């Protein structure tokens, strides 16, 4: 599956911890809205993990639906932000789904001499790594989307310049200025580009902190810092976190 096809399967929306409660205890209207927001928010990270675990887009689609059914039937009523991150509840549920999938596959008869090697069920450490990577990629993707929205609302080329730099690490500021000037029909100098990159990195870091805070429904610096460490995201926003702590 190429990246374009993958992107068409991934949903984009955000939600907070109160939706977990509303999804199972609210009024019918609040119930439907909260459930929809939760499922769409986590669907991208969930699908990335499941696709990596089963290596079959159709099987991953079915498992996503199974996860959704379990959720809608009240499988996450016990989720409590005071006892752990919602990410951990999601992770546990997905691990069980994948284990059952592989156990079922292993019980099915296979044609002898087919030459097809069936994938093994992921080991605990592999499953943990895959899930963390999928969650991490989802946070980064949402941060890029947020940066694009900032550019669209302000007209500042923060997303354009930073995205270009991320995919052209060896290009000089002068080369970037020349190419982006031609592409955008807007005069840019090397100094402009360097300043935009600096501002874009700072904004990206702030937006990433916001995304992590929303995923935890917490603005506590210690909790955010630990989550950044766990997801190997601290290098992206260590300075921004220090600035935020200084302001608090």
Image: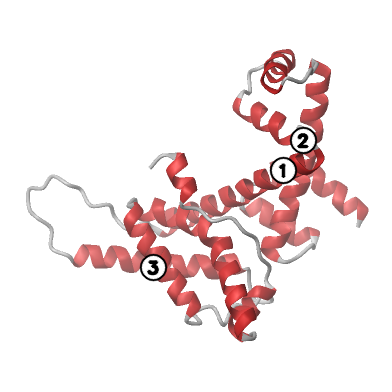
Camera-side residue: 196 or 130?
196
- The circle drawn on residue 200 is 2
User: Tag 3, which secondary structure?
Assistant: helix
* Numbered-mark total: 3
State the residue at coordinates (71%, 36%). 159
Which is more N-terminal, label 3 or label 2?
Answer: 3
Q: Where 209 sits versus 69, above or below?
A: above
Residue 81 visible in this rendered orientation of the protein:
no
State the residue at coordinates (65%, 27%). 164
- Tell me if 42 is positioned left or right of 204 in this view: left
Q: Are marks 2 and 3 in contact (CB under 8 Å)?
A: no
Which is more N-terminal, label 3 or label 1?
Answer: 3
Residue farthest toward the left in the current orientation of the protein: 113
Single out the mark in the foreground, 1 or 3: 1
Q: Residues within 10 Å of mark 2 (few under 14, many from 20)?
A: many
Quadrant of residue 97 within the rendered picture: bottom left
- Tell me if 146 is positioned left or right of 6 in this view: right
Would you name the residue on which mark 3 appears? Answer: 97
Residue 116, percent from left and from top: 17, 47
User: Tag 1, which secondary structure?
Assistant: helix
Single out the mark in the foreground, 2 or 3: 2
- The circle drawn on residue 233 is none
Quadrant of residue 64 within the rendered picture: bottom left
Q: Are marks 2 and 1 in contact (CB under 8 Å)?
A: yes
Would you name the residue on which mark 1 appears? Answer: 147
């Amino acid at each position: 599956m190429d990246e374009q096809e993958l992107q068409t399967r991934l949903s984009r929306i955000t939600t907070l911890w109160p939706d977990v409660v509303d999804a199972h205890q609210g009024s019918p209207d609040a119930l439907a809205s909260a459930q929809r927001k939760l499922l769409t928010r986590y669907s991208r990270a969930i699908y990335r993990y499941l696709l990596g675990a089963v290596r079959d887009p159709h099987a991953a689609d079915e498992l996503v639906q199974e996860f959704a059914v379990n959720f809608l039937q009240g499988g996450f009523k016990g989720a409590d932000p005071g006892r752990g991150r919602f990410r951990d509840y999601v992770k546990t549920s997905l691990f069980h789904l994948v284990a059952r999938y592989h156990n079922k596959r292993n019980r099915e008869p296979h044609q002898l001499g087919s030459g097809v090697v069936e994938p093994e069920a992921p080991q605990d450490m592999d499953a943990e790594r895959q899930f963390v990577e999928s969650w991490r990629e989802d946070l980064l993707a949402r941060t890029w989307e947020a940066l694009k929205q900032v550019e669209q609302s302000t007209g500042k080329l923060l997303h354009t310049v930073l995205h270009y730099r991320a995919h052209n690490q060896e290009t000089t500021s002068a080369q970037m200025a020349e190419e982006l000037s031609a592409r955008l029909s807007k005069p840019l100098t090397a100094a402009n580009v360097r300043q935009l990159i600096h501002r874009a990195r700072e904004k990206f870091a702030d937006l990433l902190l916001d995304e992590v805070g929303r995923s935890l429904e917490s603005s506590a610096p210690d909790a955010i810092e630990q989550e950044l460490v766990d997801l190997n995201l601290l290098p992206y926003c260590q300075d921004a976190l220090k600035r935020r702590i200084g302001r608090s």
